[in-house]
Image: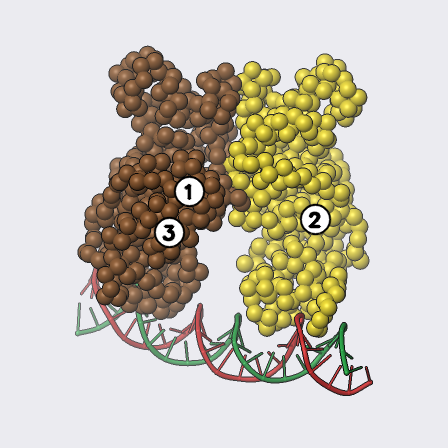
Chain colours: A brown, B yellow, C green, D red
Amino acid sequence: MVRSFAGTLGRCGAAGYRGPVTTTSGSNRAREWPALSEVARQILLEVLIHGAMPRSEIAARLRLSRPTVTRATKVLVLQGLLAEGGAQLRTPLGRPSEPLRVPGGTHRFLGVKLTADRLHTAVVDLTATTLETTEEPLRSTEPRAVVAQIARAAARHAGLTAVGVTLGAHIHNGLVVHDAYLGWVDVPLKAMTAEATGLSTAVDNDVQALTATEHWFGAGAGLNSMAVITIGAGIGSGLIVDGGLVEGAHGLTPRFHHVLVDSNGPRCDCGRRGCVSSYLTEHMLLRRLDGPPTFAQALEAARAGDPDARRVFNDAGYALGVLIGTVANAIDPQKVLLTGEGLPLHEVASRRVDQGIEDTYEGDAGLLDLDLQPFDFREWARSSAALAIKATLRATI
Amino acid sequence: MVRSFAGTLGRCGAAGYRGPVTTTSGSNRAREWPALSEVARQILLEVLIHGAMPRSEIAARLRLSRPTVTRATKVLVLQGLLAEGGAQLRTPLGRPSEPLRVPGGTHRFLGVKLTADRLHTAVVDLTATTLETTEEPLRSTEPRAVVAQIARAAARHAGLTAVGVTLGAHIHNGLVVHDAYLGWVDVPLKAMTAEATGLSTAVDNDVQALTATEHWFGAGAGLNSMAVITIGAGIGSGLIVDGGLVEGAHGLTPRFHHVLVDSNGPRCDCGRRGCVSSYLTEHMLLRRLDGPPTFAQALEAARAGDPDARRVFNDAGYALGVLIGTVANAIDPQKVLLTGEGLPLHEVASRRVDQGIEDTYEGDAGLLDLDLQPFDFREWARSSAALAIKATLRATI
DNA sequence: ACACTAAATTTCACATTGAAATTAATCGTG
DNA sequence: CACGATTAATTTCAATGTGAAATTTAGTGT
């Protein structure tokens, strides 16, 4: 099994931010996204996802002629969406190539992640580099109040191009069909937010947005297929197939968290016994331990060799392995990306994870590329902003 | 839950066959597939999948202007790939529309399905209508001998346009990576068949081909997402996502057949207990019964109320429900299509199937559209031929 | 300085497209 | 039964976008 451990947390950091950029002089006016031709959009996306590259490579990748690339990039450079300069690859012969990159600082996108009681925000540039994050308590869970709070957050930033909002809910076309945490049913969040902020708005499930973000800007950049598994308060999963996010026909996200591990296992919230969730979610894991500490404390105990804690974490590790194997069996992805606040679990129980995979995965172990991505809670807000980028770039189609 | 029971077996039958059509006068020469423009290909595909429709509808569906459609269809009609006439929809006002359909009889495709000991063939026209089927024992399982036998089958038909070969194996880009039935490892079946027959050839896994066939010509025609589950000697599954077949990064097919139903269940060939397969495959089902009759006899016993048989079929039904629910959870498809020789199982245990779905599926029951498609073993050969159609139409890209 | 190489650009002929105008086919109506 | 109404299909034609070929550009090596 191939393993890679990423050393960085996406592209977080405050690089390249040079203050607000607005086309109009009005204080809180939106920064308009320019109309782009289809090829221009394709080219921008290619550079965004795969990083700086010369025109000749763009032409080869997108199967366009060089003149076409020259023409299209001319416009993009004029609009400030592409810039020359960057890692100059020394070629021994011929005219040196002029790599094009997406400069920071032109457009800014606001991401909002809603939880049951907090509102996290992130402002990112077009490369999904985080410029700023905030966190505040949710004043009220009433939809209109939440939207007003989002609008106030947006008002603090001049010249935003778009807003993305994510939450752990069943969302279909910008409509929150059902949210257990906030108690919402059929809330037209996208329309409400768009009206309140005056900005073009995208709304989606948080795990879906995270998956898409990893596919565009993260460890799965540009892959044709990938599975993302998040471990934390809940177990989430997202799929990339044929270069696109799998969006359910009814807006349901890919669900594997009640796949059975052992019918004699612990009782799950769903009523059955021994689901992946019953071993792996934070609160189920803690419930299985006598002294009810925090997840961090439980982790510490397992690391220290406490037998109870070790047993519970090992069981969770095995369940994780079963989950990974099940997902990999489902779509045979190029990569399985594991992330979320509960990721350290893998570290203390990696042997049992491997065992779970071995017992479940039906391909050769060498075909499974498992990638562990460290995770910061702010990633949720960042991926909300990245959702706005995605929607903006899609809208040009 | 929405249910629909199809009354027909795809479009089998011998309609429209008007004898061999070849461009060249040579006896066994291949019928060349014409070069098509991109729009022509799109239009042909649209009519092929969605049935006869007037030019105006083609224009609306594909977002093309009417002049463009007129131009492209003119060529297609000239080439005989489209023809006017068909179900004339009486419009109350205006000039009546002229529906275009794909006529039978222009091109013929050979499908070959290989099993451990037999070779099934089907000849179909461009609409995947079966014109003829044959079946013969496999003389030898040695790759060169099998290819020679395929070539002889192809030689019996003049003017074929392409050949499709399917088998229950791990196939990647026309290479049979591993076939347990024939004992093959890394056999370049596509290249070998193409050389031996002189025809353009496609090779794929049988269930993948069946899935694609249902998506193009069957009960899932033109759907954006669909899951296909086949019950028979083995349990197979195929996925359509975003309008395309899910093809694994390493050529592995979607696998859900070892999803756990009950860890205390019967021992499975995979070594564990209570997998879907351990209840649902034909030989596991028979193994659980004392008197070892055929599947048909077991089915008869269950229908007659034999308690043992009923229990075994009910368990299998429940496992099927779990399988359906698991697959539906994975991709939230527009439709789940159930087919295969073992389909009658659903009929005698539908209550338990429903129970399994209810226990597993996490969406509202109303979101699940389950479709039962009667199945004839010749469907395998037909879908091999449809694979050839698909490859032919793809090749023009 | 000069040949050599490969990237980027310009030139230019050509193919594709759709808006607008036109023609075609049918129904209802006076 | 001619005529307007209506919609399908086609033709005309100007605009757009494309890539092959030629040209320019910016480096390296001798």
What percent of the width, then of the height, locates residue B312? Answer: 68, 20
Write down the residue under mark 3.
A193
Chain on which label 2 sits: B
- Quarter containing the C terminus of chain A: bottom left
Rendered image: mark on residue B110: 2
In the depicted structure, whether residue B219 falls above or below residue A326: below
Instruction: Nearest to the eye among marks 1 and 3: give it.
Output: 3
- Going by the numbered disc 1, the residue's amino acid type is Asn
How far apart marks 2 and 1 lie (CA) works out to 46 Å
Q: Quadrant of residue B265?
A: top right
Label 1: element kind: strand
What percent of the width, then of the height, locates residue B172? Answer: 53, 41
Mark 2 neighbour class, 10 Å CA radius: few under 14, some 14 to 19, many 20 or more: many
Q: Earlier in the sequence, mark 1 or mark 3?
A: 3
In the depicted structure, whether residue B174 falls above or below residue C12: above
Mark 3 neighbour class, 10 Å CA radius: few under 14, some 14 to 19, many 20 or more: many
